[in-house]
Image (cartoon, rainbow, N blue to C red):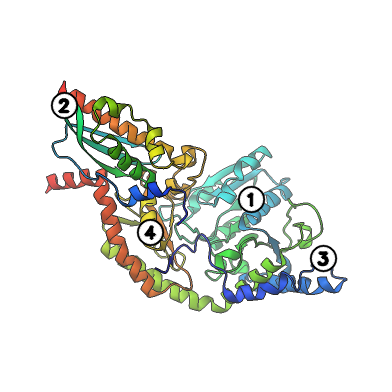
Amino acid sequence: MKRIYFDHSSTTPVDNRVLDAMLPYFVEHFGNPSSILIEEGGRPHKAVEEAREKIARLIGAQMNEIIFTSSATESNNMAIKGLALANKDKGKHILFSDIEHFSIMNQADFMRNLGFEIDFIQVDNYGVVDMDDLAKKVRDDTVLVSVMHANLEIGTIEPIKEIASFLKEREIVFHSDGTGSCGRIPVDVKDLGVDSMTISSHQFYGPKGVAALYLKNGMRLSSIMHGGFQEMGYRAGTENVPGIVGFGEAARFAMEELDERVHRLVTLGKKLWNGMESTIDFLHFTGHPKKRLPGHVSFWIEFVEGESLLLWLNLNSIACASGSACASNMMAADETGLKASHVLTAVGVPPEICHGSITFSLGKDNTPEEVEHVLYVMPGIVKRLRDMSPLYASFRQQEGKRK
Amino acid sequence: MPGPYSDKVMDHFMNPRNMGEIEDADGVGEVGNPSCGDVMKLYLKIQDDKIVDVKFKTFGCGAAIASSSMTTELIKGKTIDEALKLSNQAVAEALGGLPPAKEHCSVLAEDALKAAIEDYRKKKG
């Protein structure tokens, strides 16, 4: 059976049109974009700059505000380390939201070793940053705050504009990880008011191995990748030309087709959400019901363990993701690698329940028929797993006694 | 479908052996692993010190379900003393190995078995 891919939060396939645009830059136009004095370098150089313009346009930035990197992880590292170090004379206090991606979160210890202090801003049960908690946590020596734009695990979109204006009054630098939002929903960095933002190519049908950091003109950032003078001196290393070309084309298509994609995904997402709500009992959606990514449906089901549900869906040709601890790092050396998702813990889902969480993230090529098939398959799997569960058996027993 | 689980694990996950409950069980053991959220319940029917029937119910990941299922297969028809010798390594081996982070699931199965036998001995007095 044809696979049904509902895991676009993890990655997306490269659009064929994007691939076609990339191919000439492997062999035919292989030159180094820095070698602009020779003929071989001219075309790749031009291609990189054209891609930069397309990405700038997608998020309402200037061309010289886009720095190419190798991944969203690198962009987030560049932003946190680079902005904190460049502004360290102003203070040593940094705030992360409780639901940041690992590529932000796992910088905390390193930054502490450099002498910075890291605190975390709470989110409410929908995963929305608590503005009161932010106000409580900022200090006179706070130099940098990082809050992601959209969370790929629970779908919630954060009030970035509100946070930015709060921080601007206090002259605190604001980085936002836009991995989940850029290319998926309209993003205008000037309107949002962020100082830097991460953009990931493979989240919107571009290739892997390439990403960017938007850095507002006038911001100071210390380079953490030293070498040649590529990327305005912010990021040394020969450019991944085919990747950058593909990234640019993906950005162009995302921009041209954004309204259509969003509309489609909102409709499909609603169909999936409503269908699940009416067919599965003891179902709990996660994230904000309205302020969320289009086509993103995340939930947990009582008495159903996440990994088992994911495995059964996979056996039924349906791909999705689980925030389940057991699916987190199963090749880890031991069970300490199995931790409940920090995002679900932050939104108040009890750790033992986090194991049931599943994320369906739809993409531009999914169809209503695929949604219908998932809705058709789900109740049977849920029943099967509940029939095996001693927790469900004792629950039913108690329920029987009460009646 | 290449994945982290062996074919044996997937077979027992998809077709669990001896799944269910025994109403008049002679020994019942229920154990949980808070780090993973798994809960395993094992039912034993024992005659003349021999395990004549065994059933399980498990809330947990693929490895937990497969370990429960394999454990029931390995102890059915055995004497209590033989069953007590079953180690979690033997369960994992019979399953063609488990990913390192999932080895605790086979420990859980061993613990459930021990708890069920203890319960039987207590009931018997």
**Circle 4: element type:** helix
Mark 3 or mark 2, whichever is nearer to me: 2
Query: Contact (CB < 8 A) between labels 2 and 4?
Result: no
User: In 3D space, how far apart are the residues under numbered discs 1 and 4 (Cα atoms)?
Assistant: 45 Å
Answer yes or no: are tags 1 and 4 on the same subunit. Answer: yes
Quadrant showing the N terminus of chain A? bottom left
Cα separation, mark 3 vs mark 4, equals 49 Å
Gap in Å between the C-alphas at discs 1 and 3?
33 Å
Q: Determine which residue is flagged by label 3.
A: A34
Q: Do labels 1 and 3 share a chain?
A: yes
Which comes sooner in the sequence, label 3 or label 4?
A: 3
Q: How crowded is mark 4: few (under 14 residues within 10 Å), some or many (20 or more)?
A: few
Q: Which mark is residue A315?
A: 4
State if disc 2 and disc 3 touch (CB < 8 Å).
no
Q: Nearer the viewer, mark 2 or mark 4?
A: 2
| Residue B20 position (above or below residue A192) | above
Spatial CA span between label 3 and label 2 = 84 Å
Q: Nearer the viewer, mark 2 or mark 1?
A: 2
Q: Which chain carries label 1?
A: A
In the rendered structure, the residue with mark 4 lies on which chain? A
